[in-house]
Amino acid sequence: MCGIIAYTGSRQAAPILLAGLRDLEYRGYDSAGVALLPESGGEPAVAKRRGKIAELDAAIGAEPLPPARTGIGHTRWATHGAPSDANAHPHTGSGNDVVIVHNGIVENYAALRAELSERGHAFESETDTETIAHLLEEALDSGNDLLAAMRETCARLAGSQAIVALTSREPGVAVGARIGHAGAVVVGYGEGEMLLSSDLAALLPHTRDVAFLADRQLVRIDERGATYETLDGSAAAEVEPRTVSLDPASADKGAYDTYMLKEIMEQPAALADTFGGLMTVEPARLTLDDLGEARPWLERVERVLLVGMGTSLHAAMVGRWYFEQIARLPADTDNASEFRYREPVLGPETLVVSVSQSGETVDVLEAMNVARASGAPQITICNTPGSQTTRVADGAVHTYAGLERGVASSKTFTTSIAALFALALETARVRGRISDDELARHVRDLAAMPEIVGRQLESFDGIAKAADRFRTTQHILFLGRGPALPIALEGALKMKELSYVHAEGYAAGEMKHGPIALIDPTFPTVALAGQHALRSKIVSNIEQIRARDGEVLAIVTEGDDELIALANEALTVPPVPALLEPLAAIVPLQVLAYATADARGCDIDQPRNLAKTVTVE
Ligand code: F6R
């Protein structure tokens, strides 16, 4: 959470920082700020405002900043201290010549603040972050340079942090630090300029040559390049920039009103690119080239445990189905935040598969640490090359969805499912569970999905009507069975986070065990009733709801006239093979949530209280 950007080089820093903040706004939008080291020397110039970047733009328009070629910026998702001008980053120490931005939580900030106050430091905000600025100031005052001062400061902080700092004592220099899983610090290598950011997205307009800080690493940048150290003061090993293939154009909204709509519509291309990265049709071959040291474990393990959070957890639930059905391996899923605290029983017999589009979600990373300590081999499904999950795991299956900017995930959900399908196929292949012909059939089936999803996205028949119905509703129940259960959960998640309508995803078989008490004419149900989603059982659920005057919107297979007649309304999905039905079934639910949110006037790309990458617990 929180977006960070820093620039040093030959260009004016302010426009680069402000553009970077707009690219990072999905990380948090409670407040935004920048600090610049003026070319004329002197203290950093700071501008910060509560609210979105537009408020900061207006403030800078009214009171322009001095020319500067070095600066930092921040967009905040509030943890300690309400959103306000004073609590906005950047924060300074007492003497105003040190300025920092921060992502994470200083868990011992109360004790540090008391200690610093006793030594005469005056605080201007309620944030935990400000203690870092004061500690850094003290470390500089005792004769350290900025890099050494940052190292000394980090040693005092409890919890996970990503920090970037400037001081007027070292013009043209910025220092970054990463401790734990508070979020990435990505170093961007430009021509005669260097950048730091919490995300690739803000760097891509300037460079594709990047390096990710590892846990407990520090970096010092000036216009000539970067030097790296570890927190114990030794030179960091092997920090080489890599060239990422992401297209900066994918960071634009293009002709669409929102990133979310663009990303929903990009799913055919994202699926085709992911397919192309992981397999070929002719000959039918899997090309999972990044499994690394995890590869031999595919043959040896006795079970698979898939972990993730939110939408990625729902993709993992579809993945469980694949491992069981295709590879015939016992498989289970777990919410990463629950898994890590449960002292789970596992070892080298269990393959842990984490799913995370960002590769930086703190609960997933902590779960991976638990898995590693238990000796379990790990593979991550990830959309961000170089991110932390790809460094911690023994191997990776990359998705090729391109940058996802809408806070609510869409194309990374469907591409994660495609990647899990590929991994289950590879597991089945090496374990001799699948014949060449079966493999070829599955590969052909997945190859057909981009076009099928593309056709689904050409027509939104019926969705506007359903969205208009849901515009005024307070609650919606989403029911699914088998592979449709994760889709019911994901449909409900999309509905609540985009439109703020209370939506519950439920296993359809569970309905009679409680939720049915809620059914009345004001409480509609969305029933996932595709041909493979244990249709006959769902028919009974629909009958039971209708018998209680409940309204049903059914998601049915094209041509299923019986169900279309039984439900109040129906949205159709094309017939596809059973294992791939989740990919088709989620599409109308994504569009439905979008259209409902649009009809209710919600801020679709930046739903309230949310941030794209969750790096605090
Ligand atoms: C919901 C959504 C979140 C993320 C979750 C995990 O639309 O986007 O639920 O899926 O925060 O994020 P990643 O996949 O980055 O680990």
Image (spheres, grey):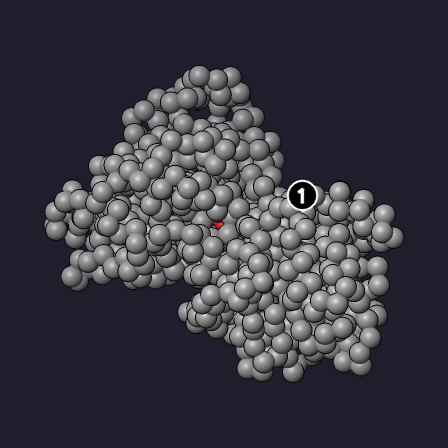
The residue labelled by disc 1 is: 107
Q: Residue 306 in the image: x percent, y percent? A: 37, 40
Image quadrant where one finds the C terminus = top right
Tally of marks: 1
Vertical placement of residue 261 versus 238, above or below: above
The quadrant holding residue 315 is top left
- Residue appearing at x 60%, y 49% in the figure: 160
Locate residue 582 relative to residue 490 in the image: left or right: left
- Residue 297 visible in the snapshot: yes
Vertical placement of residue 239 versus 444, above or below: below
Please name whichever residue, 34 or 102, is drawn nearer the observer in this view of the structure.
102
Q: For the residue carrying disc 1, how many other residues have a C-alpha within 10 Å: few (<14), some (14-19), or many (20+)?
A: some
Q: Residue 592 in the image: x percent, y percent? A: 49, 44
Please state which amino acid type lies under the numbered disc 1. Answer: Glu
The quadrant holding residue 246 is bottom left
Q: Residue 148 in the image: x percent, y percent? A: 66, 65
Please name whichever residue, 384 or 281, is drawn nearer the observer in this view of the structure.
384
- Residue appearing at x 62%, y 46% in the figure: 159
The quadrant holding residue 221 is bottom right
